[in-house]
Image: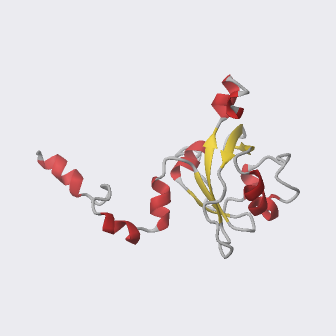
Amino acid sequence: MSDAVGDRRNSSSAGISDPAQFPALPVSVVLDRIPLPVLAVEPGGTVVFANEAFDQLMGFDEQTPRSDDALHLQDIFPANEPLGVNIAETFLTTVATRADSLWRMTDAKGDILQVRASKSILRRAEDSVVLVVLEDFTDQLWNDPKSAFR
């Protein structure tokens, strides 16, 4: 084995080689490694966590970075999205009742995305944050509008 390969395997960015390391990882590190967009929202509508896959979905990159200010649901859902009169107040309920439905979101350029959100991964009564995984159907619906409903 070459030294370069050995150095890469020993670097701190390498994968988890010992399963005992997993519980010690911060949850944000684990969620950021998930290749699907993950979004965590508190009851007021403030996005408290969004992983790199979410940033890619929304079109945030080096040229169009996500603002250092807090991202709010009103920033990513069009005003006419039928999530309720006040998106921030109804998001928890909406995720519970409309999970697996198609939702419209607005990306960084203002384009409309069609996504499907999972039910909240956090399901205990004391969890005040909604944590959902998003699946992008925009291209699929553009090519075949009925395909997401099969």
* Residue at the right extreme, as displayed: 85
Image location (x, y in percent) of residue 149? 71, 33
Q: Quadrant of residue 142?
A: top right
User: Residue at point 59% right, 43% down?
Assistant: 57
* Residue at the front extreme, as displayed: 150
Quadrant housing the C terminus: top right
Looking at the picture, tell me which residue is in the foreground, 23 or 15.
Answer: 23
* Residue at the top extreme, as displayed: 143
Residue 121 visible at all: yes
Image location (x, y in percent) of residue 129? 66, 68
Looking at the picture, tell me which residue is in the foreground, 37 or 56.
Answer: 37
User: Residue at point 18% right, 47% down?
Assistant: 5
Q: How many marks?
A: 0
Residue 86 relative to residue 51: left or right: right
Image location (x, y in percent) of residue 26? 45, 68
Residue 45 relative to residue 132: left or right: right
Q: Quadrant of residue 74?
A: bottom right
Image location (x, y in percent) of residue 56? 55, 44
* Residue at the bottom extreme, as displayed: 126
Residue 58 visible at all: no
User: Residue at point 72% right, 40% down?
Assistant: 110
Residue 89 relative to residue 14: left or right: right
Quadrant housing the N terminus: top left
